[in-house]
Image: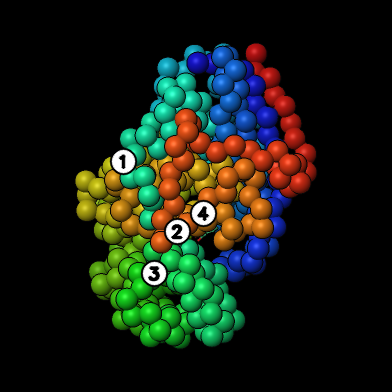
Amino acid sequence: MIIRSATLYYLVMPLKETFKTSYGVMKDKHLCIIKLVSNDGIEGYGELDAFAAPWYTEETTATATLIIKDHLLPLLQNFELQEPNQVNQIFQSIRGNEMAKAAIETAVWDVFAKMSNQPLATYLGGKISDVSVGVSVGIKEHPDELLQTVSSYVNEGYSRVKLKVKPGFDVDFIKQIRDKFPELLLMVDANSAYRREDIAILKQMDKYNLAMLEQPFGVNDLVDHAWLQKQLKTPICLDENIRSLADVIQASKLKSARAINVKVARVGGLTEAIKIATFCNENDMVAWCGGMFEAGIGRAHNIALASRVEFSFPGDISASNRYFEKDIITEEFVSSNGKITTPKRAGIGVDIDEKSLESYCKRWEYIILN
Ligand code: OSB
Ligand code: MG
């Protein structure tokens, strides 16, 4: 299979609800939809989920599209691909830039799954047809406001709730939720907002039977995370620290964490995500599927990945309507009883809603690879 063309659609999608993390506030999701077309005319879709500004990782929509156009697509030009895992290998010559790589790599997986006439989930080795899903809730001004939001998601049936926390917006908020929902599968995500000096607060959080504490310390602080994990019963989950299987191996050797938030975008695509999940499974770590406020295409890739048996813990994969008034696919993802069903048609199994795509699209580029 040879990729013959790529189209990049630059979208800005307003979020239904402003999302606040320890990094700041997000109102709109910037993303690119990538359409690749093979020499046989098969279309594969990928999604570039870098944000507009480099607050989560270094990449932005602008830097990632530059890398895609100037460095990644040229590597695929006239390259006869035998199978999708090759893309991960070919892209090794480009350092970092995982989100740019994932956008192209996932689209290639879609082409191959369509060529073999299988749903992407099956093609990836997925066995679960109803994927357990959770919801990630932003920081609120007051615990009552948080309680209201969490209650509505619990009523919708989500299997797990993740609360964003930062100093001053942590223990009281967690207590309020835990008191009201003693049995809820509850976790928190600090997006790197704490330091060793905050150990007393972190030990307080440890009392609320949290399923995980995600990324409490800095993005390179594997040693500090190991120091913290020794003192907590709550499993630490790493997010920003992890860009590859090699990073997970380091974390495992240092005992920095007992769980990994596997984001397809942050680790450069599906091949690396599966390698990480496999390693975790064999080394007593929990792997689960994270999210980046994906639109329908990125969401389809996440759901396909999460259909593999390694992903036993509910992912940050909510229904389309948790994020956007209208998604860019014709049949939006819905959750029922905390589960989302994997699409049954070949490839990602969802179709672009052209009208919706157009309504969010600021510009597009068509690139011929020959
Ligand atoms: O830290 O997991 C995170 C969203 C954007 C950037 C980072 C994170 C998140 C989320 C939301 O937690 C996950 C989702 O529902 O897509
Ligand atoms: Mg996180």
| Cα gap from disc 4 to disc 1, whole angstroms | 20 Å
Work out whether residue 355 or residue 144 is closer to the camera in this orientation and state it.
355
- Residue 334 — which label? 4
Tell me where residue 75 appears, x and y as whole percent.
Answer: 55, 22
The residue shown at (53%, 80%) is 148
- Which of the two discs, 2 and 1, labels the residue nearer the N terminus? 1
| Cα gap from disc 4 to disc 2, whole angstroms | 7 Å
Left or right of 186? Residue 81 is: right
- Which of the two discs, 4 and 3, labels the residue nearer the N terminus? 3
- Which of the two discs, 4 and 1, labels the residue nearer the N terminus? 1
Front position among marks 2 and 1: 2
Q: In which quarter of the image is the C terminus?
A: top right
| Cα gap from disc 2 to disc 3, whole angstroms | 21 Å
Q: What residue type is labelled 1?
A: Lys
Front position among marks 4 and 1: 4
| Cα gap from disc 1 to disc 3, whole angstroms | 26 Å
- Residue 336 — which label? 2
- Which of the two discs, 1 and 3, labels the residue nearer the N terminus? 1
Q: State the residue position of label 1.
A: 127
Q: What residue type is labelled 2?
A: Ser
Work out whether residue 310 or residue 148 is closer to the camera in this orientation and state it.
148
Q: What residue type is labelled 3?
A: Met
The residue shown at (75%, 35%) is 364
SS under mark 4: loop
